[in-house]
Amino acid sequence: MTTPIYQRPVDILQTLVRMDTTNPPGNEIICINYLDGLLKEAGFETTILAKDPNRPNLITRLKGRGDAPALVMQGHVDVVTTVGQDWDQPPFAGEIIDGVLWGRGSLDMKGGVTMMTSAVMRAKAEGFVPAGDIILTIVADEEAGSDYGARFVTEEHPEQFTGAKYAIGEGGGSSSFIGDQRFYNVMVAEKQVCWMRATFRGPGGHGSSPLRGKGSMAKLGHVLGTIESTRLPVHVTPVMEQMLAVLAEHTA
């Protein structure tokens, strides 16, 4: 009996890596057509959206129960150039050596696309119905500005993401060495920004009679200096606490 493709993610990743989607020019259509075929065979309805016919984007939904907002899982299949780089193995061969799959895009981000695609196919095959819809979005042109990928899809076809509140993309943490052990860190969010509007009032003045810190510009300067020299407190989230505890357990 043939093992279902969603249980063979290495085969999917090898196939994707062997497709040269160096951006520019991208030519992501070869990867998108392959993944589109897998998803349709698994019973998904897919949508192809393209600003350039050779650079399409693929979207599908795993329907949920409607008890929660939709979750977007998004990844890209274009890769950066290998020109001028010295590779130990051919970058588009997808060879497995000592248990490691070599190839441009195996990490950024055809590996992530493989995991997401395999996950939704497995969920459908096993009858899993999530609380909310899962919107799988596979895009082109991430490495060179997203004009043909994420920007095009979100600006020209926002209806594809109706009901979405959360998104998972690439870069959820990175690997690091502690001693001689390699760990993959956990990351659940990026830092956000805090916008403030401040109004400073003070008397008018003249260079011949300085206000000595009473003017509005002096007050602004004082506030900016205080912000620059103040270190904000560290907030350790529950996820971070758990990760640090696990790291301590394995490095003690």
Image (cartoon, rainbow, N blue to C red):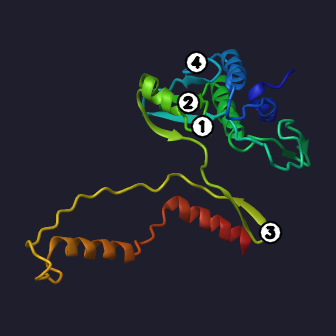
| Amino acid on which disc 3 is placed | Asp
Q: Secondary structure at mark 4?
A: strand
Check disc 4: other Cα within 10 Å, few if <14, some if 14-19, many if 20+. some
- Disc 3 marks which residue? 180
Q: Are marks 4 and 3 in contact (CB under 8 Å)?
A: no
| Amino acid on which disc 4 is placed | Ile
Q: Secondary structure at mark 1?
A: loop
Nearer to us in this view, 140 or 218: 218
- Tell which tag, 4 or 1, sits nearer the viewer: 1
Q: Are marks 2 and 1 in contact (CB under 8 Å)?
A: yes
| Amino acid on which disc 2 is placed | Gly
- Residue at the spot 21% in from the left edge and 75% down from the top edge: 218
For residue 48, the mark is: 4
Nearer to us in this view, 128 or 74: 74
Image height check: is 237 above or below 3? below
- Residue at the spot 59% in from the left edge and 37% down from the top edge: 142
- Disc 1 marks which residue? 142
Q: Secondary structure at mark 3?
A: loop
Confirm whether residue 133 shows in the render.
no
- Tell which tag, 4 or 3, sits nearer the viewer: 4
Mark 4–mark 1 distance (CA, rounded to whole Å): 17 Å
User: Residue 51's spot in the image, x, y percent?
Assistant: 54, 21
Mark 3–mark 2 distance (CA, rounded to whole Å): 39 Å
For residue 149, the mark is: 2
